């Protein structure tokens, strides 16, 4: 089991500083036995121009080492280091409870931690929104059905029978299966079971059971939608136009700022996403919402795309209006500012658009379309 107790390590008194030429070297020894249950210590160091910078870099390095060590345990890469007699203690941390829910909660705790730790590398980083998605699927589709059952006795056949009765999209069924697979994998990591029965669940091709998702608008219908967006004139309508003409995900277009638009070369630089995230406490209970300018969904999502001529015209119109407004208020126009702003002068989040699209469709008697693009 991977149990990270960061508070035991992130302590300035464990850090030693020494002068090294024109720089400062921060050093410390990590005692992994207090965290992972095996006897390993490791010395790490970082050098910077100031003591504070060296300490900061060292703490980031320490977090990376802790995560790496945790994965080594998980993958059984540390032979003869793990004290197998402590396995019972590890299992006791889920209360000698072999219910699926106990292992599911343990898995979600680890995912929550992964979303909160800042790493130089994003290889092991996951999005807070991903954690929220996992939690929602678990609470709605997994815990009510399988939560109280002994994880050692659940079979592929049982789960397959249940999946065959579900009338959901193929994507949603795969999301449910993923939660089950990760939960059973946690039980495998702890030595409770040997095989993962969820990997053999068959889903097949499914269609959405509700509504019709329009993935493409022909040129004639697209022109109608674009005319109505501009006729409406509200910022969120302009944002819809930005989504349609750029092909970007809603959270990517919400993050558009002026410095991401190259009007001379007609290029849009997709670099960030503006998201509404949920912050959870240690018991995975919702504390509050937080809006952040965060990383894109994947590293491959970082890209440059052509600036559509019609979108260029719209953005230049918005920019001139924004510059004029700033002059009236005696403010300097901010080239780093967000493009699409709500009534409070703040950027939109994709969740705000979900309720606006149906109202827009109803007002102008349009066909169904969703603003979400996976």
Image: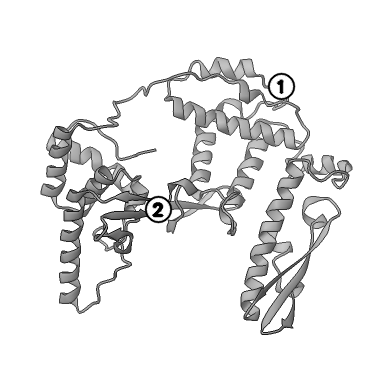
The quarter of the image holding the N terminus is top right
Secondary structure under the numbered disc 1 in the rendered image:
loop
Left or right: residue 47 versus residue 194 is left
- Which of 172 and 334 lies nearest the eye of the viewer? 334
The quarter of the image holding the C terminus is top left
Q: Position of residue 312 (x, y in %)?
A: 20, 54
Q: Which residue is mark 1?
A: 153
The chosen color scheme is one colour
Q: Which residue is mark 2?
A: 273
Q: Is residue 2 visible?
A: no
Left or right: residue 64 versus residue 179 is right
Q: Earlier in the sequence, mark 1 or mark 2?
A: 1
Q: Position of residue 56 (x, y in %)?
A: 63, 71
Q: Position of residue 268 (x, y in %)?
A: 31, 54
Q: Is residue 244 visible?
A: yes
In percent of the image, x 22 and y 46: which residue is there?
Answer: 241
Q: Quadrant of residue 356?
A: top left
- Which of 255 and 96 lies nearest the eye of the viewer? 255
């Amino acid at each position: 089991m991977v149990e990270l107790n960061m508070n035991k390590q992130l302590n300035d008194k464990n850090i030693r500083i020494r002068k090294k030429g024109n720089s400062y070297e921060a050093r410390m020894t990590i005692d992994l036995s207090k965290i992972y249950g095996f006897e390993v210590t490791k010395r790490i160091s970082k050098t910077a121009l100031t003591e504070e910078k060296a300490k900061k870099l060292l703490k980031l390095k320490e977090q990376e080492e802790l995560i790496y060590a945790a994965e080594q345990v998980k993958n059984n890469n540390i032979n003869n280091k793990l004290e197998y007699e402590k396995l019972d203690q590890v299992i006791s941390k889920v209360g000698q409870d072999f219910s699926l829910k106990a292992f599911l909660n343990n898995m979600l705790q680890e995912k929550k931690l992964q979303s909160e730790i800042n790493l130089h590398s994003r290889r092991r980083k996951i999005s807070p929104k991903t954690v929220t998605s996992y939690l929602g699927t678990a609470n709605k589709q997994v815990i009510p059905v399988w939560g109280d059952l002994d994880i050692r006795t659940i079979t592929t056949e049982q789960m397959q029978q249940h999946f065959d009765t579900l009338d959901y999209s193929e994507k949603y069924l795969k999301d449910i299966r993923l939660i089950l697979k990760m939960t059973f994998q946690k039980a495998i990591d702890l030595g409770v079971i040997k095989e993962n029965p969820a990997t053999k669940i068959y889903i097949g091709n499914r269609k959405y059971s509700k509504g019709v998702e329009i993935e493409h608008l022909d040129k004639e219908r697209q022109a109608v939608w674009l005319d109505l967006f501009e006729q409406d004139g509200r910022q969120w309508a302009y944002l819809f136009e930005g989504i349609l003409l750029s092909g970007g995900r809603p959270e990517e277009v919400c993050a558009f700022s002026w410095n991401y638009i190259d009007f001379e070369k007609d290029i849009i630089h997709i670099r960030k996403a503006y998201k509404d995230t949920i912050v959870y406490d240690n018991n995975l209970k919702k504390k509050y919402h937080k809006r952040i300018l965060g990383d894109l969904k994947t590293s491959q999502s970082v890209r440059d795309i052509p600036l559509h001529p019609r979108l260029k015209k719209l953005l230049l119109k918005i920019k001139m209006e924004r510059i004029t407004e700033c002059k009236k208020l005696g403010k300097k126009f901010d080239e780093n500012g967000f493009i699409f702003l709500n009534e409070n002068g703040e950027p939109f989040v994709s969740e705000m658009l979900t309720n606006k699209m149906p109202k827009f469709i109803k007002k102008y008697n349009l066909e169904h379309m969703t603003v979400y693009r996976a």
